[in-house]
Amino acid sequence: MIGAAYLAPEGLEATLAEELRRAGAPIAAWHGRLALSPAPPVASAWALDTWTAPREIAAPSVKAAADALRAMQRNWQAYNIDHHRRAALIAARLPPVKARPLVFPEPAPTGHLGAWTLLAPDRLLASPTKSSPFVNGECRFVEDRAGPPSRAYLKLWEACTRLGDWPRPGQECLDLGAAPGGWSWAIAALGARVTAVDKAPLDPRVAAMPGVTMRLESAFALAPERVDWLFSDIIAYPARLHAMLAPWIASGLVGRIVATLKFQGETDHDATAAFAAIPGGRVMHMFHNKHELTFFWTNPSVAAAGIDPVRIGEARAPGSQIAKDDLQRVGAVAGGIVGGDVGGEDQVGRVP
């Protein structure tokens, strides 16, 4: 019996297997990059997608397979590694599900989506529920190939899409390890103000964008300050990143944190667990991460107060209007806010 299935990022099957072993979810077999476990589903940072209710279904014919899927629900995505002709015939009998690239900041899909695969020509594995709203966990965008100085902006786009929020006009942001400026470009393009911190300079095109300020210094030497968003794509060992972010989280001066955990050599699962244990935080492997995870944190005081970060950004935007009692509430809860460093970006043209 298969209790859960976990889709590994390409090339990170061993990393996912070790995470699942530590979580007490043994892998009985692999089906391509899909790890099949007899144990109930567990939280996984490294899985692109988790099939949470898989069931094996006899499929003696194409029609029988499609009928079985349609009897459960309407929308399905396929994960195909073999039996491609038969899988295509089954898919043709199902309502089409197109993995259309998002135009950022377009929200993530909200429609219910299940997943299926052919374990054998006459045997389906289907899960009507899964963890990712994206087909096979792949969050794709209509890319901007002219503006940003690197492809790292796609990680920020995906992080904001998965978070369901992004910097708004008038909000204050810090971008740590910013050079050459892919994340700063993405933040400024949204109309927010961003202070880019790095020992290396920004790409001149990014530095000239409205709302961008550059500080040529080490991110590790910064004391916590009031910002709506703190972003970090620094190349640093996760333990050092944890030590850097801890004072920011403890200060209560930052509304949200989005930071990349970069692993050099072996995966540090203990460091991952330390980030996951931070109250209000979570870690996940996004489609645009490499041997990396992304850490998300939201100020719990702001979340508990129900403060709308969009409105707080509006309060800071020139000429905007917001009720006086809202401003007083924001100030009382969050002090008037929501809530060797090297730029860690993938240069345009670099081979991944």
Image (cartoon, grey):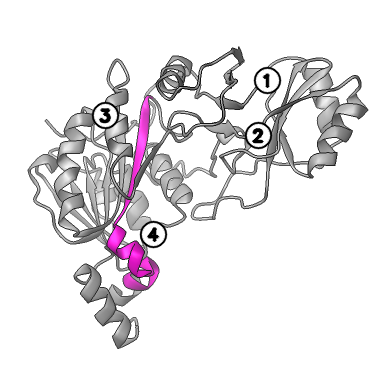
Label disc, if present, on residue 271 of the rendered structure:
3
- In the image, residue 55 above or below residue 192: above
Taking depth in this image into account, of 226 and 16 the one nearest to the observer is: 16
Measure how far apart labels 1 and 2 are at the Cα level.
11 Å
What kind of residue is marked 3? Ala
Expressed as whole percent of the image width and height from the top left, the position of residue 62 reads 89, 24
The label nearer to you, 2 versus 3, is: 2
Instruction: Name the residue carrying label 4.
Output: 190
What kind of residue is marked 4? Leu
Q: Secondary structure at mark 2?
A: loop
Q: Quadrant of residue 327?
A: bottom left
The label nearer to you, 1 versus 3, is: 1
What kind of residue is marked 1? Met
- In the image, residue 334 above or below residue 153: below
Expressed as whole percent of the image width and height from the top left, the position of residue 315 reads 31, 76
- In the image, residue 324 above or below residue 298: below
Q: Label 4 crowding class (10 Å Cα cut-off): few <14, some 14-19, many 20+?
A: some
Measure how far apart labels 2 and 3 are at the Cα level.
29 Å
Label disc, if present, on residue 53 of the rendered structure:
2
Q: Which residues are magenta?
A: 291-312
Measure how far apart labels 2 and 4 are at the Cα level.
38 Å
Q: Quadrant of residue 72?
A: top right
Taking depth in this image into account, of 84 and 300 the one nearest to the observer is: 300
Question: Which comes sooner in the sequence, label 2 or label 3?
Answer: 2
Q: Quadrant of residue 131?
A: top right
Label disc, if present, on residue 1 of the rendered structure:
1
Question: Which comes sooner in the sequence, label 3 or label 4?
Answer: 4
Residue depicted at x 85% and y 33%: 68
Of the 4 image quadrants, the one containing the N terminus is top right
Question: Which comes sooner in the sequence, label 4 or label 1?
Answer: 1
